[in-house]
Amino acid sequence: MRFKILISFVFWIVLFGISNSLAQRTSIFGKWQTIDDNTEKPRSIVEIYKKDGKAFGKIEKLILEPHEDPDPVCDKCDEDDQRYNQKVIGMEIIKNLVKDDDEWEDGTILDPDNGSVYDCKLWVEDGKLQVRGYIMFFFRTQEWLPTE
């Protein structure tokens, strides 16, 4: 009897593991949790969505430390950028990416903490969103985690 229970238990664990791996996200679209490069703590929730055949992303929520402004604006954005002095929550930070095989590229991403805009590329690897910002051949890639 114990052996049957053990076999049943193992079966459900294996089945649960398989269903979780099958449910792993393969699309860039949806909500993703960003991770701060310096603290390695969650920083925000960004929703990636499709509009007119291109990919865009906006900040849905900020995950702030107690001392941080709960409703910041992008005061470091370039004054010619329409996002200058606009609220960060709800801000479109990823713009105009086009699909190329399994990647979305040729768009831009804004870092609202410093106002810098970079060329951008997105792809999913092992269920995590790879976000690459670059200028010429210098780049940095962040890994964003699926949420919801």
Image (cartoon, grey):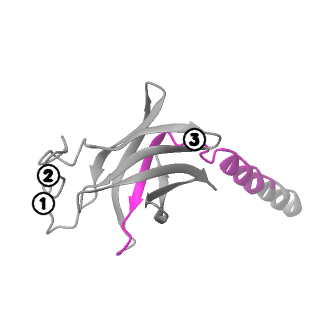
Q: Which residue is mark 2?
A: 73
- Residue 36, position as x, y percentages in the image: 36, 67
Image quarter for residue 95? Answer: top left
Image quarter for residue 114? Answer: bottom left
For marks 3 and 1, give the CA distance: 32 Å
Q: Residues within 10 Å of mark 3 (few under 14, many from 20)?
A: some
Q: Which mark is residue 109?
A: none
- Residue 115, position as x, y percentages in the image: 23, 57
Query: In the picture shown, does residue 107 fall above or below 125?
Result: above
Q: Which residue is mark 3?
A: 27
- Residue 98, position as x, y percentages in the image: 51, 37
For marks 2 and 3, give the CA distance: 30 Å
Q: Secondary structure at mark 2?
A: loop
Disc 3 residue type (three-letter): Ser
Report the side of 63 relative to 108 (left or right): left
Q: Nearer the viewer, residue 110 or 65?
A: 110
* Residue at horizontal 62 percent and vertical 55 percent from the top: 125
* Range covered by the magenta-colored residues: 11-38
Q: Secondary structure at mark 3?
A: loop
Disc 2 residue type (three-letter): Val
Q: Which residue is mark 1?
A: 69
